[in-house]
Image (spheres, grey):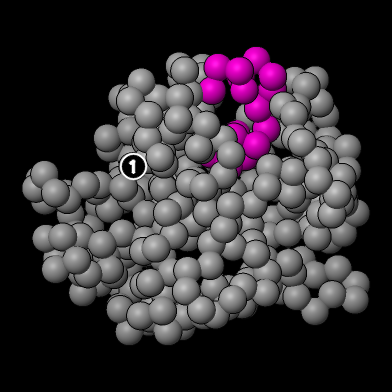
Amino acid sequence: MASSSGLVSKRPSTHHARACLGFERDSNAYIASAPIPAVMLQELPPFPFANNPVFICIDLERAACRGNCLTEIGLTVLDTRDLGPRTKPQPIPGTPPGNRGQGWFKFLRTTHIRIAEHLHEDCGRSYCKGDPRMFAFGQSVIIKLSNVKRRLEDWYKNIELRGLAAGETKRHVIVLTFASYLEETELRIQDVSWFQAVDEAWDIQKMGFSTRIAASLPTPKPKPSLSDLVQHLGIVPDSDRSRLLHNAGNDSAFEIQCMLSGLLLDPVEWASLGLAPLQYLSPSWREHHINANQLPAASLEG
């Protein structure tokens, strides 16, 4: 259970993180994690997913031209029970992660919420990055600021009860953030207690692959940007980064993709990490979603 005082997102060990993904055996003993042989990534994980977690990633955006008010919320979920194998509620054979976890990207489910009172378009100002209309993983929804607390609390309750096994009363939930200060601060402002309710809280910016990329850049940094990660892990090409990043929905999806890719590198990829971008994976987004979000909102929820 996360502490209720201060900022709580941590850097998990690579061993523990991989144990949650089934690629190392969960143990309290220290294990020096090595890159995963490429052939293993084409097979089902060799171990059970430690605690069968549900990962949820939250990313928030504020706009300086709107008085630094909350403008967007991005939520992405990855349930390890979707990765299989399983027999209930229906049989599925299980899915290998494949190269850099790309085989699991299709199980990500992303929600993009825009705040009605603070609708922010591409205003063209240099200090405002991102375009809320560029959500590429589904249709955006618009809600009133007064409904944020209820919407987030209801969403989280559904996650806790998702796919319960016999004898379980709640799922093991791991919340993911990227440089967690904004998310933890804003949720306190909205009186949403996610960080006190989750079982674990991880900051992707602090994970081992992230710090390796930051330290290996031509101009080393103490911490990488999300743009650094999606570039060097081969997730978003140069031509798409400026239009897709800084959209809260997209960022929450890309952050989980970065986590999977960074943890599931083979030895060749690990050796070159941060020195040059890895070969780009097939795009996980769809242009028709972007086009749909360019249209005027059909309705206001709540």
Vertical arrangement, residue 17 with respect to residue 187, above or below: above
Q: Is residue 71 left or right of residue 90?
A: left
**What type is the residue that disc 1 sits on?**
Leu
Element carrying mark 1: loop
| Residue at the spot 71% in from the left edge and 74% down from the top edge | 161
Q: Is residue 216 left or right of residue 85?
A: left
Residue placed most toward the observer, 58 or 26: 26
Q: Which residue is mark 1?
A: 245
Vertical arrangement, residue 196 with respect to residue 78, above or below: below
Residue 19: x, y in percent? Answer: 78, 47
Residue 271 among those drawn in magenta: yes
Residue 297: x, y in percent? Answer: 27, 62
Boundaries of the magenta span: 258-273
Residue density around tag 1, few if under 14, some if 14–19, many if 20 or more, within 10 Å:
many
Image quarter (top left, top right, bottom left or bottom right) of the C terminus: bottom left
In which image quadrant can residue 214 be found?
top left
Vertical arrangement, residue 96 with respect to residue 206, above or below: above
Residue 257: x, y in percent? Answer: 55, 40
